[in-house]
């Protein structure tokens, strides 16, 4: 077996003394101490040939000419320490969270080089160290795989939640969708989706494609509905603008009219038409409404000015009618309908001659006079009822029937007393008292009719 011939290295002043057995799971290595341990597992002869001691016996690892046996042995021991340091580095990577499968692969490759490695050291111990490292890395790999699977399931659930919310937004009735808020929320969901895709665990291709297909379809459906809705809204707005422009034009044509009563009603009709008309766009609707209100203000300001002038003119009429109303109210209460009617007729004629009063006083004055007129009508009705022959006849007949009934009850009362039946006496007396009270009331009414 041929081995490379190493270049001479500076001779150390002295070698460290051998120490205890190697610490196989250390997080770092004391280089000099490890070299001191390694040299105890080999030897070098006077010609510079170096051998490593293994459970199977010695194995030549190389030659270091022009050097002492100690220097040659130390050279190959340092080669061993480099392998040990590689194992420690892998252990540290595993502890730091490196993928277990990568550590398993690297440690296995390193272990496979040991049987032929041209080094001097505790190859059996290093192999055992690597066995432990590989076992730990495999366990770590299993845990990492389980965590990765759990993370993928959680990520799939999170994306499913995004999809469901997007589909819910897309399924809304277009007439009830709050487009601004729903559109903003859909954009937020898309941003979350991209963030999950960028920084979250990678999902299985089939799962990722299925979820993205649904999410993309929901976005497309929402966008399609939005375009249709606003296209239809534009049509409605255009029709609303056309109708309201016509209303405003008619209102503007009436603004200078002095036919206040007729045009006031027309403006009310135009307002009703406005309320029934579709909305135009916000900008158009606001502008048209401002024009509509402006022309109405012109007309009603002119009407109010006209009414104010008339009210001032009618103040004198109000003074007259207030005096007439006092005379009419002085007729109350009405005891002589005939005389009251004669006096009220004179007041009514004067009332008509007095003319109009200010608008604010019309209801008060008219209602006051109507109260007196109703009182007169009630008094005339009462007088008629008292003189009505039919009413008198009915009252007289009722009195006769009550008299007969009273006589019969008096006989029953005497019979009950004679029989000593207290209960019958009480019942007969109660019935007799009721009939007598009824007759007294009817007799009073008959007297009033006379």
Image: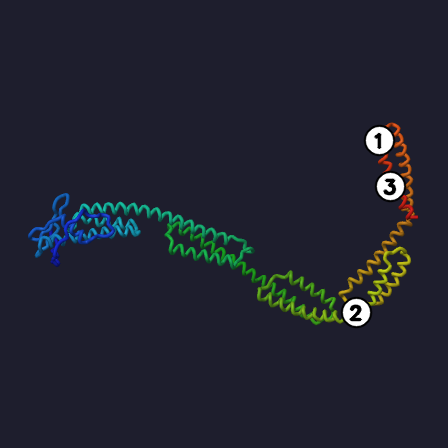
Residue 328 x/y as whole percent? 85, 61
* Number of other residues with Cα within 10 Å of mark 2, as a class: few under 14, some 14 to 19, many 20 or more: some
Give the labeled residue for mark 1. 424
Question: Left or right: where does residue 221 sit relative to residue 81?
Answer: right
Could you tell me which secondary element the residue under label 1 belongs to? helix
Front in this rendered view, residue 219 or 443 = 443
In 3D space, how far apart are the residues under numbered discs 1 and 3 (Cα atoms)? 21 Å
Closer to the chain start, of discs 1 and 3, is: 1
Front: mark 1 or 3: 1
Q: Residue furthest right?
A: 450
Q: Residue furthest top?
A: 419
In 3D space, how far apart are the residues under numbered discs 2 and 1 (Cα atoms)? 77 Å
Question: Left or right: where does residue 236 sit relative to residue 59?
Answer: right
Q: Are marks 2 and 1 in contact (CB under 8 Å)?
A: no
Residue 285 x/y as whole percent? 60, 65
Front in this rendered view, residue 97 or 213 = 97
Which numbered marker is on residue 438? 3
Q: Are marks 2 and 3 in contact (CB under 8 Å)?
A: no
Front: mark 2 or 3: 3
Front: mark 2 or 1: 1
Residue 82 x/y as whole percent? 19, 53
* Residue appearing at x 39%, y 48% in the figure: 153
Closer to the chain start, of discs 2 and 1, is: 2
Corner quadrant of residue 273: bottom right
* Number of other residues with Cα within 10 Å of mark 1, as a class: few under 14, some 14 to 19, many 20 or more: some
Corner quadrant of residue 193: bottom left
* Residue appearing at x 90%, y 44% in the figure: 443
Closer to the chain start, of discs 2 and 3, is: 2
Residue 337 x/y as whole percent? 89, 56
Give the labeled residue for mark 2. 315
């Amino acid at each position: 077996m041929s081995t490379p011939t190493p270049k001479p290295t500076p001779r150390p002043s002295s070698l460290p003394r051998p120490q205890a057995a190697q610490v196989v799971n250390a997080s770092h290595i004391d280089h000099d101490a490890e070299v001191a341990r390694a040299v105890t597992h080999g030897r070098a002869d006077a010609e510079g040939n170096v051998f490593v001691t293994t459970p199977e016996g010695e194995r030549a690892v190389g030659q270091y000419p022009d050097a002492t046996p100690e220097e040659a042995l130390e050279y190959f021991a340092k080669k061993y320490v480099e392998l040990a340091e590689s194992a420690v580095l892998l252990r540290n990577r595993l502890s730091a969270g490196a993928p277990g499968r990568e550590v398993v692969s690297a440690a296995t490759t390193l272990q496979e080089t040991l049987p032929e490695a041209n080094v001097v050291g505790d190859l059996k111990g290093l192999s055992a160290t690597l066995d432990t490292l590989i076992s730990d890395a495999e366990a770590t790999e299993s845990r990492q795989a389980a965590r990765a699977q759990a993370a993928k399931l959680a990520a799939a659930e999170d994306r499913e939640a995004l999809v469901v919310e997007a589909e819910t937004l897309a399924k809304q009735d277009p007439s009830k969708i709050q487009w601004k808020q729903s559109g903003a929320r859909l954009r937020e969901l898309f941003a979350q989706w991209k963030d999950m895709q960028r920084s979250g665990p990678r999902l299985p291709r089939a799962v990722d494609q299925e979820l993205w297909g649904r999410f993309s379809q929901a976005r497309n459906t929402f966008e399609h509905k939005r375009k249709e809705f606003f296209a239809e809204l534009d049509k409605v707005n255009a029709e609303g603008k056309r109708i309201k422009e016509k209303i405003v034009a008619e209102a503007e044509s009436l603004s200078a009219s002095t036919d206040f009563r007729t045009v006031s009603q027309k403006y009310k009709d135009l307002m009703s038409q406005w309320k029934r008309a579709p909305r135009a766009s916000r900008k158009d609707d606001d502008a048209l409404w401002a024009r509509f209100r402006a022309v109405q203000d012109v007309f009603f300001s002119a009407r109010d000015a006209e009414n104010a002038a008339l009210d001032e003119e009618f103040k004198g009429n109000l003074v007259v009618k207030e005096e007439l109303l006092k005379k009419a109210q002085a007729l109350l209460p009405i005891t002589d309908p005939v005389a009251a009617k004669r006096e009220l007729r004179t007041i009514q004629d004067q009332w008509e001659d007095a003319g109009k009063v200010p608008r604010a006083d019309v209801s008060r004055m008219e209602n006051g006079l109507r109260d007196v007129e109703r009182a007169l009508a009630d008094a005339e009705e009462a007088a008629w009822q008292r003189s009505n022959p039919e009413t008198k006849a009915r009252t007289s007949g009722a009195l006769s029937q009550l008299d007969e009934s009273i006589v019969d009850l008096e006989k029953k009362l005497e019979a009950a007393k004679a029989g000593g039946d207290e209960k019958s006496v009480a019942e007969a007396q109660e019935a007799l008292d009721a009939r007598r009270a009824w007759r007294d009331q009817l007799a009073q009414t008959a007297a009033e009719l006379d």
